[in-house]
Image (tube, rainbow, N blue to C red):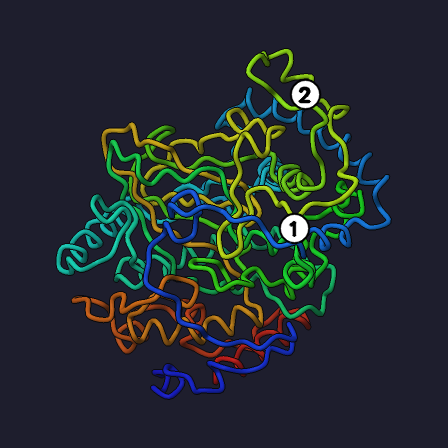
């Protein structure tokens, strides 16, 4: 049964309303036209301005009464990071756990342990290689038929402002891809069994794609974390769910990056940033459309994972007593990085290293010296067309500064998103963007693909993709009577159907 046009187009009530879960007015504000460079200060050519003084007050509130515990926790953290970096550097890309798609139903325990520890994984052969290669050829034909397609850099396209190409829709709808998303998201857990969330019901998030050519040095994304920047410290951001409370209390070892219920009230986009994600992505991920190895325009990740998160969150509270100068050698640098050379700031400043409102959180060796990014950032192993790479939403990641390979490095960005109230609300707006052929609500606006030749219509998609894939796109009603549902899951399916207009 096709969804009525009135539901696909939504109603004013679905565009502007009051979000009782967050206690905030929610307005669908169109974003200005742009490209992926809008997301990163380092790519946009803009200068990061000092944060207002309210951030100094915020930092004081976050750690007030826990100062002594925080000092001790910082020392433990630096010691632990130093030891773990040696492990990561020795293993290199072998530190990234891998599993074959056919083995997802019986995942070996070593894979599970390493994935929880590292926050990253490669799932091999999710779609047949021939299928993935055909996706790429069809994308090239789609771009050729639509030369007005925007991309970055404009003079030498590598990352395309495409969200609704036939290949992207088919890939997101592939049953193996959906099964992989479900497998990964079930590594998460909720301490509240009645929380309105289901990691067993993936939802589709329309993101970009990349076809990076050999020699490219323009798409040089340094180490960064998506999902907001200053929001991680703000009380009206991640503070709404107390996501990082254990860290502020000096008990970082008790912080659980896999607990989902605390993230439901969190707001990751307080500033309507271009590309800032308002949907809860448990994982970021991409589907490979090329054979690509280390150094060939591919992904780097930081397998320190939760330790790295703790570090960049606590870094703004500490400063060195002595700093490097022109005469500093390796021995001097070791002493300068020692915890004894670092002190908790007696008076908090407004500085949040690498965090700029409406942009992604960026990291570098100067601002985050203890992470030793040159050694702790590692390439993912070689991938082949049809492999899926996924990393936890808090993971620091980057791409090769220069593509030194001899063939294209091509991926479709496809994250893994659970069913939540906020995600269902996003699906309503994204569904309208799909009908119109415009970028999703999180992305730079403009007419997008609205005039593109060969773009699938809503009627065609509903006739050709599975019911499960239609549900993931917000095009079909969820089954509240599905066997084995927990109470919170059933209530979430019911609530999602209400939000989606079914």
Residue name at image x 40 percent, y 37 percent? 399
Crowd around label 2: few <14 · some 14–19 · many ≥20 (10 Å): some
| Residue 383 visible, this angle | yes
- Considering the numbered disc 2 on the image, is that residue within a helix, a strand or a loop? helix
Q: Residue at x 76, y 40 (%)?
A: 253
- Asked if marks 1 and 2 touch (Cβ < 8 Å), the reply is no
**What's the residue at 36%, 65% (across, down)?**
32
Can residue 502 be spotted in the picture?
Answer: no
Residue 258 shows which numbered tag? Answer: 1
In which quadrant of the rendered image does the N terminus lie?
Answer: bottom left
Whole-percent x and y of residue 242?
A: 72, 58
* 334 and 398: which is toward the camera: 334
Give the foreground label among 1 and 2: 2
Picture layout, residue 275 above or below residue 352:
below
Secondary structure of the residue carrying tag 1 is loop
Q: Residue 454 occupies which quadrant of the picture?
A: bottom left
Q: Is 129 drawn above or below residue 469 in the view shown? A: above
Q: How many neighbours does mark 1 have within 10 angstroms: few (below 14), some (14-19), or many (20 or more)?
A: some
Q: Quadrant of residue 24?
A: bottom right
Q: Which residue is mark 2?
A: 336
Q: Earlier in the sequence, mark 1 or mark 2?
A: 1
Side of 471 relative to 366 (left or right): left
Q: Which mark is residue 124?
A: none
């Amino acid at each position: 049964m096709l969804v009525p046009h009135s539901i696909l187009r939504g109603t004013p009530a679905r565009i502007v309303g009051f979000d009782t879960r967050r206690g905030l007015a929610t307005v669908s504000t169109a974003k200005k036209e742009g490209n992926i460079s809008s997301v990163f200060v380092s790519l946009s050519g803009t200068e990061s301005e000092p944060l207002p003084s309210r951030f100094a007050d915020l930092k004081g509130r976050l750690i007030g009464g826990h100062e002594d515990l925080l000092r001790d926790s910082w020392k433990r953290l630096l010691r632990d990071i130093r030891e773990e970096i040696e492990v990561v550097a020795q293993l290199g890309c072998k530190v990234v756990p891998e599993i074959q798609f056919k083995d997802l139903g019986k995942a070996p325990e070593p894979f599970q342990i390493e994935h929880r520890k590292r926050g990253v994984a490669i799932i091999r052969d999710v779609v047949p290689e021939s299928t993935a290669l055909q996706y790429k050829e069809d994308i090239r034909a789609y771009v050729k038929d639509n030369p007005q397609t925007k991309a970055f850099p404009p003079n030498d396209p590598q990352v395309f402002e495409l969200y609704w190409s036939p290949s992207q829709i088919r890939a997101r709808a592939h049953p193996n891809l959906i099964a992989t998303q479900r497998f990964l998201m079930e590594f998460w857990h909720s301490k509240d069994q009645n929380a309105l969330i289901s990691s067993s019901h993936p939802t589709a998030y329309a993101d970009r794609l990349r076809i990076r050519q050999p020699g490219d040095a323009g798409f040089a994304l340094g180490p960064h974390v998506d999902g907001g920047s200053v929001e991680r410290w703000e009380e009206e951001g991640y503070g709404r769910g107390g996501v990082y409370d254990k860290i502020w209390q000096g008990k970082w070892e008790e912080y659980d990056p896999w607990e989902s219920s605390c993230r439901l009230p969190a707001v990751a986009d307080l500033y309507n940033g271009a590309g800032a994600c308002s949907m809860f992505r448990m994982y970021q991920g991409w589907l490979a459309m090329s054979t690509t190895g280390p150094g060939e325009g591919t992904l780097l990740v930081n397998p320190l994972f939760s330790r790295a998160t703790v570090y960049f969150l606590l870094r703004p509270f500490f400063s060195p007593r002595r700093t490097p100068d022109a005469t500093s050698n390796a021995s001097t640098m070791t002493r300068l990085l020692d915890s004894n050379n670092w002190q908790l700031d007696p008076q908090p400043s407004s500085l949040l290293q690498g965090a700029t409102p409406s942009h992604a959180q960026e990291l570098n060796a100067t601002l985050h010296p203890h992470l030793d990014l040159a050694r702790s950032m590692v390439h993912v192993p070689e991938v082949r067309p049809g492999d899926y790479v996924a990393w936890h939403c808090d993971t620091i990641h980057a791409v090769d500064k220069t593509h030194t390979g001899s063939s294209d490095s091509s991926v479709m960005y496809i994250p893994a998103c659970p069913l939540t109230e906020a995600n269902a609300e996003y699906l309503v707006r994204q569904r309208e963007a799909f009908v119109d052929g415009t970028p999703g609500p999180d992305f730079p606006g403009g007419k997008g693909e609205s005039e593109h030749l060969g773009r699938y219509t809503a009627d065609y998609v509903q006739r050709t993709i599975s019911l499960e894939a239609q549900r993931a796109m917000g095009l079909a009603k969820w089954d509240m009577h599905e066997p084995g549902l927990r109470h919170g899951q059933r209530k979430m399916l019911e609530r999602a159907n209400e939000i989606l207009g079914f």
